[in-house]
Image (tube, rainbow, N blue to C red):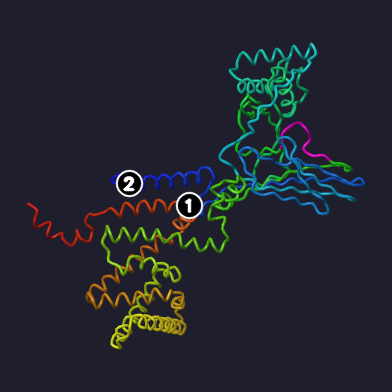
Amino acid sequence: MRRWHLPVLVALLTATAVLLIVYKVRTLGYPLTPAQEVQSWIVEARLSFEATGGAAKAELAIPFDPPGFTLLDENFVSRGYGLQTERRGNNRVAIWSTRRPSGRQVLYYRTTVTPHQTQTLEQAVPALPTAPAYDELHGQAVNAILDEVRSKSADISTFSSLLMQVLARPTPDENVQLLLPRQATREDRVRTAIFVLAGARIPARMSRGVRLVDGTRGAQVEAWIEVNNGERWIPIDPDTGAQGYPPDFLVWWHGDTPVYSIERGRNAELRFSVTRTMEAALETATRQAQLSQSAVSSYSLLALPVHTQNVYRTLLLVPVGALLIVFLRNVVGVLTFGTFMPVLIALAFRETDLVAGLLLFSVIVTLGLAVRFYLEHLKLLLVPRLAAVVIIVILLMALVSILSQRLRFDVGLSVALFPMVILAMTIERMSIVWEEHGPADAIKQGIGSLIVAAGCYLIMFDQRVEHFVFVFPESLLLVLALTLLLGRYTGYRVTELMRFRALTEAIKP
């Protein structure tokens, strides 16, 4: 059991992290990169009418869980009107009311939608429709059409698609001509199809919506038909018989009832406008997750206050730097001051940028080291000596900032942002190594610390890494798994192979 304990633990950590990341990306739509954007649409419905006196009320059907899209935002603009929304079957209605309107009235409804990965229609199975009481002439026409379609179809979906193709023929036969009015529209064909399908006891309903075409004003409403096969609703194009809504079609409401109604108003007009826009993928995914009430999003760092998020944006990067240090020390063999001092130095570099940070760090550490050797002659105790080093470091920081200002070297002004404790501890540790192991080891560890700190800075504060770790904090489980694996590494370090290369060449046969 002990032999397999670590591999099993690593496998569990990896599987958990990968599954959570895949779920967030595939289901919730969280982006893998910080600059990723998604396409969204702003759809506006403008309802206008002339008041005829007395209290007025206007009702407008509005989208409710449209297939293939997610409603991100809704706005109602109606000065002087009361507003409420209510659910009616599988539709939703906005109701405006006012006591004493006068003149032309204009009401607005605006929604922002974004495409969703799946097109989900409600799965409820409706009751089978009652066969209409056809008269003799219409009954014969309906039966003739049903017999023709039934002989060429295999199930309800193909039956309904073939029926729409028969009704949409450029030159319909006499049976279709009897059922369809002259100059039949899409709505007429949908109503006729529902009428015919009722004779076959197949549930069907009309749906209407708009096409999402950028810059469209006065978008036309399109009618579609949906049939139920006993398991789900299947949308069918009345013109071609093709199944499934196109990706740019937004379902607005279901049923053959009017999309709006006006009480005490006349000359009503409804116009749709569509505008395409781009939004940050992370913001869109967060709103989608909140609307879906996902348990994962409820415990996400994105739900924290902004100032707390900013703290974790930096804190979550520390394990990434720690993993790099583990690799460079145990596998490569780079010498550093302390185990995690380079990570702290890298955090300081974030305030100054890399090149300026290396320069300022080297200047202050060199000057501080000189002062530290002077303090050694005073035979001070450890704590007072560290306090003296901290004081001197602060004075050096102030001196460098003043000189930078006089020399118009703005980079030097950011030295004040360096954590003084990090500098003081680095100076103290370097002086101890200098005294115990000589200047060569001290300089070697100092250079190694700066190299590792630079590497940590480049990896930790890369925008893609910072974004990925913050949005997917479960990725730290992968970091933990790799750290555990490196903890079992007992092979030669790269520096050792280079050091003993001459010896290995000498003993070769």
Displayed quadrant of residue 327: bottom left
Residue interval drawn in magenta: 253-261
Please provide percent x and percent y for residue 19: 45, 44
Q: Residues within 10 Å of mark 1 (few under 14, many from 20)?
A: many
Displayed quadrant of residue 398: bottom left
Looking at the rendered structure, the number of numbered marks drawn on it comes to: 2
Please provide percent x and percent y for residue 321: 38, 61
Residue type at tag 2: His
Q: CA distance from mark 2 to mark 1?
A: 26 Å
133 lies left or right of 342: right
Whether 184 is among the magenta residues is: no
**Residue designated by label 2:** 5
Give the vertical position of 297 relative to 403 (above or below). Answer: above
Residue type at tag 1: Phe
Please provide percent x and percent y for residue 5: 32, 46
Name the residue rendered at 56%, 58% in the picture: 304
Task: Spot the residue most to the left.
Answer: 509
Q: Secondary structure under badge 2?
A: helix
Nearest to viewer (mark 2 / mark 1): 2
Task: Spot the residue most to the bottom.
Answer: 378
Q: Which mark is residue 472?
A: 1
Task: Spot the residue most to the front.
Answer: 1
Name the residue rendered at 33%, 80% in the picture: 382
Give the vertical position of 45 relative to 142 (above or below). Answer: below
